[in-house]
């Protein structure tokens, strides 16, 4: 099958938003009550981001809500850590609860914020679950060996790796291990980070990730796929040799940040088909389609 970009991309632009925004992009994605839910980042006119919901019955045609569902101001006692915006949510369903890990920005640099909801109307915000600087957090959808697990990217001065850690309660994290590092001399040589919630397959945990290569005039963001061991998720079983999505359309190459394909949400259908929701050039929301078997084949 390969991977196919939807012919009517982008599926959401700022023209589809009922309030004034600079852009809409980088959504988390999940199915809830037979609807496709995208929790999208909107950059407000002041330049700081909030989150808004877009809903669809078919996964292609979305309606954006009339106002943001989560703003920095909603964080109350945690406000000082998200004052400059909340960004790039990744959604994990565990039981009937949807856990949302996203980036909070402030003068303290980026860190990971955790919130949860059961209905996408009422949210409980737990606040920071990392120290700065950290981002690109994705939580596994079930316990492994009695623990919750997550991947993230602690941004050290000279490293840009993906790490994995474990928790008894989703709040307190430890047992840190370096999981994956950028491959030098390749499309991902400068930094990498998770691009989806891991999905359980017969062969292991499948996860999208993004890679960045910098040039004299800027950077190019592309997507790859990686396979982790089912019982020992800190073991990398395989990865795609090449990128699987790269910016080659005008709506991906020109925007607020040129030459970017960035994702933090996908939906896996019961038949194994996958809808990857991604953004082009930090300006819009697009769709690419593939399936589990094809992505697994790339990791072997």
Image (spheres, helix red, strand yellow):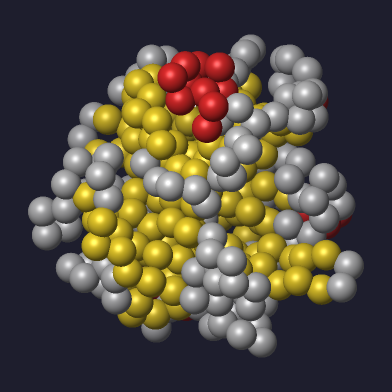
Q: Position of residue 209 (x, y in %)?
A: 52, 63
Residue appearing at x 40%, y 31% in the figure: 127
- Farthest front residue? 108
In the image shown, does 231 or 64 lie closer to the viewer?
Answer: 231
Residue 72 against residue 4 in the figure, above or below: above
Q: Nearer the viewer, residue 55 or 221?
A: 221
Q: Residue at x 41, y 36 (%)?
A: 128
Q: Is residue 203 left or right of residue 186?
A: left
Q: Nearer the viewer, residue 45 or 59?
A: 45
Residue name at image x 38 percent, y 72 percent: 179
The image position of residue 141, as x and y in percent, is 28, 48
- Looking at the image, residue 109 sits to the left or right of residue 266; the answer is right
The answer to whether residue 80 is above or below residue 142 is above
Q: Is residue 228 visible?
A: yes
Quick check: 30 left or right of 69? left
Q: Is residue 274 at least partly visible in the picture? A: no
User: Looking at the rendering, in which quadrant would you find the C terminus?
Assistant: bottom left
Q: 241 or 50, which lies in front?
A: 50
Residue farthest to the top? 66
Q: Position of residue 102 (x, y in %)?
A: 48, 39
Q: Quadrant of residue 116?
A: top left
Q: Does 279 sit above or below residue 232?
A: above
Query: Residue 265 location in percent, x, y?
Result: 50, 46
């Amino acid at each position: 099958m390969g991977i196919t970009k939807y012919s009517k991309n982008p599926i959401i632009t700022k023209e589809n938003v009922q309030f004034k925004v600079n852009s809409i992009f980088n959504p988390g994605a999940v199915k809830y009550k037979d609807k496709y839910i995208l929790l999208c980042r909107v950059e407000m006119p002041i330049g700081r981001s909030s989150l808004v919901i877009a809903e669809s019955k078919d996964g292609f045609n979305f309606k954006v809500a009339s106002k943001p569902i989560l703003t920095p101001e909603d964080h109350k006692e945690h406000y000082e850590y998200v004052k400059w915006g909340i960004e790039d949510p990744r959604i994990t369903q565990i039981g009937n609860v949807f856990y949302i890990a996203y980036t909070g920005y402030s003068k303290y640099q980026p860190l990971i914020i955790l919130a949860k909801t059961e209905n996408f109307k009422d949210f409980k915000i737990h606040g920071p679950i990392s120290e700065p600087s950290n981002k690109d957090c994705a939580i596994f959808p079930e316990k492994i060996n009695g623990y919750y697990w997550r991947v993230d990217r602690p941004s050290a001065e000279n490293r840009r790796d993906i790490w994995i850690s474990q928790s008894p309660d989703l709040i307190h994290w430890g047992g840190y291990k370096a999981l994956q590092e950028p491959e030098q001399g390749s499309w991902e040589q400068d930094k990498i980070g998770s691009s989806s919630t891991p999905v359980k397959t017969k062969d292991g945990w499948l996860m999208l990730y993004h890679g960045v290569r910098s040039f004299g005039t800027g950077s190019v963001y592309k997507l790859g796929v990686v396979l982790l061991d089912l019982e020992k998720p800190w073991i990398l079983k395989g990865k795609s040799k090449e990128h699987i999505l790269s910016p080659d359309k005008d709506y991906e190459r020109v925007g607020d940040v040129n030459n970017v394909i960035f994702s933090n949400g996908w939906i896996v259908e019961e038949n194994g088909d996958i809808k990857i929701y991604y953004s082009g050039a930090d300006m819009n929301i697009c769709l690419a389609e593939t399936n589990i078997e094809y992505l697994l084949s790339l990791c072997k």
